[in-house]
Image (tube, coloured by chain):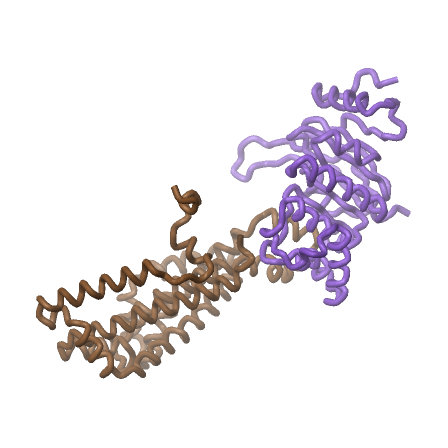
């Protein structure tokens, strides 16, 4: 048994997330193998089912790439709003038990509604397209921020809380010196979850009524029966997601360097 | 006038009731005693004798069911905020904040007291230095050994120069050598700084090393003996140990006090 296998229950991903950067050889080999297999399949299958890489890259060059920026701006904007709302409500629910008792079922209700329903509500309720998209993203992402932050706040170790209380902090000090910093790891994790959630949801939200953005680009590609364009957009989305996750992981490493 | 570190315990009783009904647990049956300003007191007893509960009441984290505990005439649970900056505790585990460096952990109580940042840093550094940790002020707790972490916790308690210093089984979880060294440090510092110090322990050596008074707690939470090491009629440590052990085993005071 190799020594690193002895670590036990920890997943490979969890271990790699904390390891110093090294070239991800296995990942690159795996992806290259997939790409090669894809190319080979494309030789035997008509291009409107599996287009070859040549076609995909040609489509890639022809795409309106400003759509990428538009979609990214929507995601980032909605995430910032969701974060402020989610954390603000989490603090209110943490500070007051009655608020928590009333608000928790409502939050659960929000989380139980499928994304498609939110999109339909957005279309029925709001006229302005940007607001529709923002509404759907916020209503999906804010509860994730809220629940993760609140659970982390409530999970702060009693030992540490007692230690701090023995020094007689004010309520604000107890929160800023202990509860909030103890919640940072959970907040970073919920950013990661929400980023991939938002990138997947935004494209669906953009299908309805938007005339810009990657979702709209996908609709156009589908209407033109341009399979290689659909694949090109998909490729862009996947790359964005991977890059965003890599950036967040680095940020996490910097902020959480106090962790063993 | 009573000093800020003098403690009065009168008719103290603590019963824990579970919120969902069920049987109540008596943690402290009845305690009455006083501790003078500057006293070095060890509390010994077996598991379940209510010594940690007593300490939590003294810190102000729990309230008595009956009776009262007063420090300098005020109750630590009632006048909670009055004890800002006068009381510090060292716990069983170091309880350092893992996201703060050693220096920032020691600064914490000074931050809470609203001291100026340069004063915080200067005093925290001085204490880390006194505890032999000057080179490690930028280390995070996970980078330090158990003994070093507990030293940081000691520095964090001493840095506010508290009138009352409490230690709850603070050295028992470390290896013997480290634990003895830390105990000596704690006792020396408490003595030179003139604090009232209370050390809760289940180890008789620790209690005897404190060199002041030993309160022997029986189960549940009752005083079996209040031993003043200067006036107890035994001359040998072995004899004293035997006396305490007999009391703990029988959970009763000595029938015939040593002549």
Residue A174: % across, % down: 63, 58
Query: Up-down: is A86 above or below B40?
Result: below
Which residue is painted at 46% across and 57% down in the image?
A18
Frontmost residue, B168 versus A165: B168
Instruction: Tell me the quarter of the picture where residue A176 sits.
Output: bottom right
**Viewer can see residue B246:** yes
Say how many tags the image has.
Answer: 0
Q: Position of residue B56 (x, y in %)?
A: 68, 42
Q: Which quadrant does the N terminus of chain A fall into? A: top left
Residue ranking furthest to the top:
B256
Residue at horizontal 76 percent and vertical 62 percent from the top:
B122
On screen, residue A195 versus residue A30, left or right, reads right
Q: Is residue A67 left or right of residue A145?
A: left
Chain A colour as displayed: brown
- List x then y, in percent, for residue B156: 71, 53
Chain letter, colour purple in render: B
Foreground residue among A74 and B252: A74
Q: Residue at x 81, y 21 (%)?
A: B239
Is residue B82 visible in the rendered image? The answer is no
Q: Nearer the viewer, residue A94 or A43?
A: A43
- Residue B128: x %, y % from top left: 73, 54
Figure quadrant of residue B255: top right
**Left or right: A46 as drawn, with respect to A118:** left
Relative horizontal placement of residue A49, taking residue B116 as reference (left or right): left
Q: Nearer the viewer, residue A53 or A78?
A: A53
């Amino acid at each position: 048994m190799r020594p690193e296998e002895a670590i036990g229950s920890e997943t490979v991903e969890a271990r790699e997330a904390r390891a110093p950067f090294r070239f991800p050889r296995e990942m690159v080999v795996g992806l290259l193998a997939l790409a090669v297999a894809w190319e080979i399949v494309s030789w035997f299958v008509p291009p409107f089912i599996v287009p070859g890489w040549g076609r995909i890259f040609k489509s890639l060059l022809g795409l309106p790439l400003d759509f990428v920026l538009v979609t990214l701006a929507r995601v980032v904007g909605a995430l910032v709003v969701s974060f402020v709302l989610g954390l603000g409500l989490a603090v209110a629910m943490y500070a007051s038990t009655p608020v928590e008792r009333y608000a928790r079922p409502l939050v659960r209700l929000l989380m139980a509604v499928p994304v498609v329903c939110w999109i339909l509500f957005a279309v029925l309720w709001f006229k302005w397209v940007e607001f529709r998209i923002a509404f759907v993203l916020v209503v999906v992402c804010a509860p994730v921020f809220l629940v993760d932050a609140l659970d982390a706040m409530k999970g702060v170790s009693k030992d540490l809380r007692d230690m701090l209380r023995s020094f007689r902090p004010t309520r604000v000090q107890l929160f800023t010196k202990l509860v909030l910093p103890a919640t940072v790891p959970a907040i970073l994790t919920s950013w990661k979850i929400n980023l991939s959630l938002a990138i997947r949801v935004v494209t669906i939200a953009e299908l309805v009524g938007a005339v810009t953005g990657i979702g709209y680009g996908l609709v156009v590609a589908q209407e033109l029966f341009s399979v290689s364009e659909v694949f090109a957009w998909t490729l862009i989305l996947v790359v964005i997601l991977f890059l965003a996750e890599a950036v967040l992981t680095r940020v996490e490493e910097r902020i959480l360097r106090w962790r063993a | 006038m009573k000093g800020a570190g003098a403690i009065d315990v009168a008719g103290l009783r603590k019963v824990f009731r579970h919120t969902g009904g069920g049987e109540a647990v008596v943690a402290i049956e009845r305690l009455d005693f006083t501790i003078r300003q500057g006293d070095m007191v060890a509390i010994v007893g077996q598991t379940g004798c209510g010594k940690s509960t007593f300490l939590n009441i003294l810190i102000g984290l729990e309230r008595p069911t009956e009776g009262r505990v007063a420090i300098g005439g005020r109750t630590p649970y009632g006048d909670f905020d009055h004890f800002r900056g006068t009381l510090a505790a060292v716990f069983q585990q170091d309880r350092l904040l893992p996201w703060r460096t050693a220096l920032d952990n020691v600064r914490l109580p000074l931050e809470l007291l609203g001291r100026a940042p340069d004063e915080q840093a200067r005093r925290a550094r001085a204490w880390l230095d006194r505890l032999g940790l000057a080179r490690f002020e930028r280390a995070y707790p996970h980078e330090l050994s158990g003994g070093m972490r507990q030293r940081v916790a000691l520095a964090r308690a001493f840095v506010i120069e508290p009138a009352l210093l409490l230690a709850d089984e603070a050295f028992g979880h470390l290896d013997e050598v480290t634990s003895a060294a830390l105990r000596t440090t704690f006792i020396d510092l408490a003595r030179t700084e003139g604090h009232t110090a209370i050390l809760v322990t289940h180890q008789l050596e620790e209690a005897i090393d404190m060199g002041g008074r030993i309160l022997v707690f029986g189960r549940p939470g009752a005083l079996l003996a209040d031993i003043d090491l200067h006036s107890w009629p035994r001359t040998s440590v072995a004899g004293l140990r035997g006396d305490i052990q007999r009391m703990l085993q029988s959970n009763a005071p000595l029938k015939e006090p040593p002549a």
